[in-house]
Amino acid sequence: MKTIRLTAAQAMVRYIAAQMSEDGERFIDGIWAIFGHGNVAGLGEALEQAGNQLPTWRGQNEQTMAHTAIAYAKARKRRRAMAVTSSIGPGATNMVTAAALAHVNRLPVLLIPGDVFANRAPDPVLQQVEDFDDGTVSANDCFRPVSRYFDRIARPEQLLTALPRAFRVLTDPAACGPVTLSFCQDTQAEAFDYPESFFEPRIWRIRRPEPDSRDVADVAELIRASKAPVLVCGGGVVYSEAETTLSDFATRHGIPVIETQAGKSALAQAHPMNFGAAGVDGAESANRLAEAADLVIGIGTRFQDFTTGSWALFKNPGRKLVSINVQGYDADKHGAVGVVGDAKVCLERLSSALGDHQGNAFDPQSRLDWLAKVDAHCSARTDVPDGYLPLDAEVIGAVQRTATENTIAICAAGTMPGALKLLWQAPQGGYHMEYGYSCMGYEIAGAMGIKLAQPDRDVVCFVGDGSYMMANSELATAVMRRVPFTVVLTDNRGFGCINRLQMGTGGAQFNNLYRTSNVEAQPDIDFVAHAAAMGAHAVKAKDIAGLEAEILAAREREIPSVIVIDTDPMHGPGEAGGGHWWDVAVPEVSTREQVMSAREGYITALKDQRAAD
């Protein structure tokens, strides 16, 4: 057996560079890195020597570098991914939030935090977290509950088993999620005689698991017996590349489709079988179907509470639940009749089993009526009074009117996710929302990741001032790398979304908007100057017409453009024919009359909650 002597870090880099996707490209497109004493001498040296065989990119914050990597993987439908490395201590724990985000959203990212010395000679090393009762624990153990696969590399030869296991998880549609290889810093520099065969290129195929034929037959029988079935489209449809298959299935068998956040834009909004968003942030046309459905068929969805209206949406007393999912954990949730398999394959097998069966228990006009309401609600207001602040719906309308079939809207947290799910009329593939973890600060890093994955798309990033303040530094990275996208920054001077939720549950306005916070002076933040200081083209739009003009101008630039517009903090997406109750617990005891009134409404709403049969 031929061997080659390499440090563990050099071996890791060489192996990663040799792992290929089915399209002949590296599965790991490159690695984001901020170096410190825990990875600069080992991995840093190995990455410098690798050069373009495994490109290294420098970001500004470990969490947002990982967000960029995650958005890239999502935009590539999990067919390619990125790695992220940090030093030990705060650099590593900065990535824990991103790991949780990837875990919830079932997205692949390879995290390589440096770790303490395996030999323990210099203990406690700088930034080491010491456990008083367990000598094997380090700060990196925080990654364990938010990683699909976790390993600590304490000897060079451990890579021979750890790396193949890591890539199995990254490329497995059922187990897919974050992988953490915690890399002891002295181990990175130690050498070992590795088999040359270990570094031979390998193609990782994304498998399409076949469903059990008995499960398919059971669901086909349920569909034939149902009078009002509905399909709930989740992100698994997109990752399976089953968009056309879903379109054909829904059309052939006459079953309307409603969307989750992750599944939105699998079918274009213009598709005649797409009845819009479901649940808390849902369309009237979609939620009416869900409420009346006697058979709810989830495809590639986790059935998150926003989709199900906290399990109070599906009101038909005789309704049955079907869940088609590549992951058995998701397929068997809430007493569902589960079908475990790839979304595309399952739909094909189910369509074959149904033959010419077709239902028609829906009103095709309802989606057209709803879309007309959306158009009216998002239209530009005329004759507005002095001091008028536009609603988020008007901002969405402005972007919608300037959008093309090439436009992708991205967002993550605050008011805009619900407003966009309800109001954004996406072309197929024109929507990217991180709402599994709803992580503030994902937006700008995510927009960069999408543009890197799909450089020919027009990427428009919606971000509120609160989320922008949490994480904006990758804007400078995008400027340095000449990654152009458009940021629409809505400034409502605080956390407007949660302020409205606070009021909606009977609470007094407190600590969300700046004007209700305990501060010595109200801030007047110049977001235009801030974004310009990082090199972006930045401007403030005084009204909706100005916003439309600036969005069109931004497409001609080779750097990010930031367009700031003041908005009304007191109103959400408004009524466009949708919405549903969401379970947010209201205090049982309070001195506030409004809270007690909200509690009464909460108790009434709980009676419709029905999580399982």
Image (cartoon, rainbow, N blue to C red):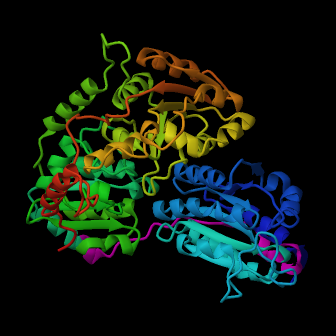
Quadrant of the frame with the C terminus: bottom left
Quadrant of residue 222 within the rendered picture: bottom left
Front residue of this view, candidates 138 and 569: 569
Looking at the picture, does residue 369 appear above or below residue 178? above
- Count of marks placed on residues: 0
Residue 12: say if magenta: no
Residue 445 visible in the displayed image: yes
Return the x and y of residue 153 as percentages of the image width and height: 74, 78
Q: Is residue 2 left or right of residue 378?
A: right
Inspect the magenta stretch and tell me whether residue 207 lies in it.
yes
Q: Is residue 494 above or below residue 154?
A: above
Q: Is residue 429 visible?
A: no
Residue situated furthest top in the rendering: 383
- Front in this rendered view, residue 37 or 275: 37
Give the left or right position of residue 578, taking residue 416 as reference: left
- The magenta segment is 187-216
Task: Pinpoint residue 209: horizontal percent, then vertical percent.
Answer: 43, 70
Q: Is residue 466 left or right of residue 581?
A: right
Question: Taking 371 as reference, is 447 above or below it?
Answer: below
Quadrant of res 591? bottom left
Residue drawn at (83%, 59%) of the image: 47
Q: Image quadrant of residue 98?
A: bottom right
As rendered, which of 305 and 105 lies closer to the eye? 305
Judge by depth and name the residue closer to the eye, 63 or 90. 90
Expressed as whole percent of the image width and height from the top left, the position of residue 17 reads: 75, 61
| The N terminus: image quadrant | bottom right
Q: Residue at x 90, y 76 (%)?
A: 4
Q: Position of residue 491 (x, y in %)?
A: 48, 31
Location of residue 529 with respect to 143 vertically, above or below: above
Question: Residue 278 vs residue 414: left or right?
Answer: left
